[in-house]
């Protein structure tokens, strides 16, 4: 498979390593300032760039008929517009706030736990995410997906960053050293606490999931998710 990497930072370099190890070719490394892009040279684009760059990178690919795997976070206000452009151009798209297998299982565990806790008013939920100090967005995309998973399965109506608001899930974002990504959900009562936590030890799991998604999307048309790729029911 001929892969174009949009964003050649920490994730772009890890995607190159994992892609090559699975027998793929990296035919383009597009970063800030790249002017010439030969869209006809690649089978799939993988975008791990920046919140400001993602929308244009992704929709330009759709306009050239190139399927896109998108891992960039912090640009979700424009994702519906991107999906419309994908459909108009009969292209294919997967966005995931987190491509790791472990986190995608954690997403399902989180929803199941939220369902079980939904009627237990004595427990108050909160969410904490910790990432490295270079991260541009807060809360993390993964934390937003986790909060949405709880909201869909409970009486909480929204989430707030660093703020306590009635009926809202409080999210705390910490930026510490080189932490690749740690997410904790805590249900606290006066007598006990239930906590579930995912800790990424490095970036390999994110990159492997994105490459597997790129392999899966070949010859497909439409909007898909990691649940489709991983066949999680
Ligand atoms: N979904 C996931 O599994 C997952 C995992 C890790 C990181 N991320 C997200 O991926 C993104 C990148 O993370 P990172 O750690 O590699 O960041 P990074 O800062 O190391 O790399 C981003 C790169 O994008 C480049 N860039 C800037 N403008 C660009 C443009 N117009 N076109 C192409 N590239 C451009 C930057 O120069 C930089 O090299 C972030 O949004 C992060 O939150 C998602
Ligand atoms: O390093 C990052 O930046 C990460 N971003 C994603 C997020 O915002 O959830 C996934 C984890 C790593």
Image (spheres, helix red, strand yellow):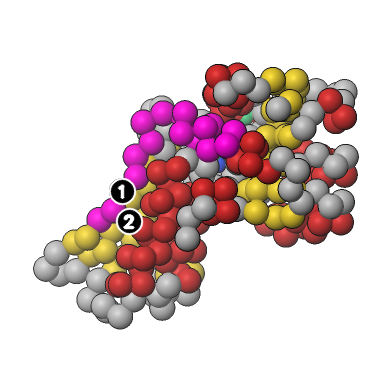
Rendering quarter of residue 47: top right
Question: Which residue is rendered at x = 19% and y = 69% of the image?
Answer: 189
Q: Are discs 1 and 2 less than 8 Å apart at CB?
A: yes
User: Closer to the N terminus: mark 1 or mark 2?
Assistant: 2
Residue 15 spot, x, y in % from top left: 58, 26
Q: Pointer 1: residues within 10 angstroms few (<14), some, or many (20+)?
A: some
Question: Which residue is rendered at x = 65% and y = 48% of the image?
Answer: 94
Q: Is residue 90 above or below residue 60?
A: below
Q: Which residue is mark 1?
A: 197
Q: Which residue is mark 2?
A: 185
Rendering quarter of residue 88: bottom right
Viewer-proximal residue among 212 and 46:
212
| Magenta residue check for 193 | no
- Magenta part of the chain: 195-212
Viewer-proximal residue among 232 and 111:
232
Rendering quarter of residue 31: top right
Mark 2 C-beta to ligand 2 under 8 Å: no
């Amino acid at each position: 498979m001929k892969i174009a990497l949009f964003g050649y930072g920490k994730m772009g370099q890890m995607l190159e390593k994992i892609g090559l190890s699975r027998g793929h070719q990296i035919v383009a490394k597009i970063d800030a300032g790249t002017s010439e892009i030969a869209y006809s040279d690649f089978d799939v684009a993988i975008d791990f760039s920046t919140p400001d760059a993602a929308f244009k990178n992704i929709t330009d690919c759709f306009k050239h008929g190139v399927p896109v795997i998108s891992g960039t976070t912090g640009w979700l206000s424009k994702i519906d517009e991107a999906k419309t452009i994908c459909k108009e151009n009969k292209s294919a798209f997967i966005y995931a706030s987190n491509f790791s297998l472990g986190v995608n299982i954690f997403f399902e565990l989180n929803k199941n736990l939220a369902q079980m806790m939904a009627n237990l008013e004595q427990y108050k939920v909160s969410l904490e995410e910790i990432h490295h100090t270079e991260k541009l967005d807060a809360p993390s995309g993964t934390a937003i997906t986790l909060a949405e998973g709880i909201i869909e399965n409970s009486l909480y109506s929204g989430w707030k960053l660093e703020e306590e608001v009635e009926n809202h899930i409080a999210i705390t974002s910490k930026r510490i050293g080189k932490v690749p990504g740690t997410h904790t959900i805590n249900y606290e009562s006066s007598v006990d606490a239930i906590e579930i936590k995912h800790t990424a030890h490095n970036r390999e799991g994110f990159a492997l999931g994105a490459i597997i998604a790129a392999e899966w999307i070949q010859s497909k048309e439409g909007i898909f998710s990691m649940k489709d790729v991983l066949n999680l029911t």
